[in-house]
Image (cartoon, rainbow, N blue to C red):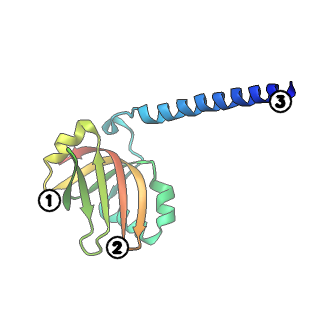
């Protein structure tokens, strides 16, 4: 009888964990974000200064900027197709280090109108910076970008 009771509690516990886990997964995948252009800016910085911080102290820069809203000013280096969307790259042409911005749906059309060489101000959530050992360069990713000025 004790084994049946334990098995019953174990199954109920597993069911509860599955329900909680499913709820968390559902929440993460259906989470809606406020329009980035309306969210308060944590930092305003030039692309060159931001790249410089990540090159000289990547750990500190990641702690400072990751998951923060940044307003970044720089020159568009390249437009990268991403399915039906486009990612905007701002790069240091001497080192190859770059920032890459993935735009939120409502700003995707405005981003597509940018051209290489345009000066732009982009507001986005910083996903953090990474050093590529293979390419020997740093890149900083941004999500939910909004074009502020073109």
Q: Nearer the viewer, mark 2 or mark 1?
A: 2
Residue 81 point in image, percent of width and height: 20, 52
- Mark 2 in CB contact with mark 3 (< 8 angstroms): no
**Distance CA(mark 2)–CA(mark 3):** 59 Å
Label 1, secondary structure: give it. loop
Foreground pick, 138 / 53: 138
Visible residue check, residue 73: yes
In whole angstroms, how far apart are the C-alphas of marks 2 and 1? 22 Å
- Residue at image location 43% in from the left, 56% down from the top: 128
Residue 107 location (% of width, % of height):
23, 40
Q: Name the residue under label 3.
A: 3
- The answer to whether residue 102 is above or below residue 33 is below
Per the image, label 2 sits on a secondary structure element best described as loop
Q: How crowded is the residue under tag 1: few (<14 C-alpha within 10 Å), some, or many (20+)?
A: few
Residue of label 1:
116
Residue nearer the viewer, 42 or 132: 132
Label 2, on which residue? Answer: 135
Labels in figure, total? 3
Residue at 29% over, 52% down: 101
Q: Which of marks 2 and 3 is nearer the N terminus?
A: 3
Q: In which quarter of the image is the N terminus?
A: top right
Q: Residues within 10 Å of mark 2 (few under 14, many from 20)?
A: few
Q: Which of marks 1 and 3 is nearer the N terminus?
A: 3
Image point (64%, 32%), residue name = 17
Q: Is label 2 in contact with label 1 (beta carbons under 8 Å)? A: no
């Amino acid at each position: 009888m004790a084994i049946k009771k334990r098995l019953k509690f174990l199954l109920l516990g597993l069911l509860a964990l599955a329900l909680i886990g499913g709820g968390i997964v559902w929440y993460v995948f259906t989470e809606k974000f406020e329009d980035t252009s309306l969210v308060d800016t944590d930092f305003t910085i030039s692309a060159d200064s931001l790249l410089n911080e990540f090159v000289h102290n990547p750990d500190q820069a990641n702690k400072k900027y990751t998951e923060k809203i940044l307003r970044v000013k720089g020159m568009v280096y390249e437009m990268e197709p991403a399915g039906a969307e486009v990612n905007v790259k701002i790069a240091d042409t001497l080192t190859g280090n770059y920032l890459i911005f993935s735009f939120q749906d409502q700003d995707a059309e405005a981003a597509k109108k940018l051209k290489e060489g345009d000066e732009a101000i982009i507001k986005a959530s910083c996903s953090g910076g990474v050093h590529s050992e293979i390419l020997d360069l740093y890149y900083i990713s941004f999500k939910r970008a909004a074009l502020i000025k073109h």
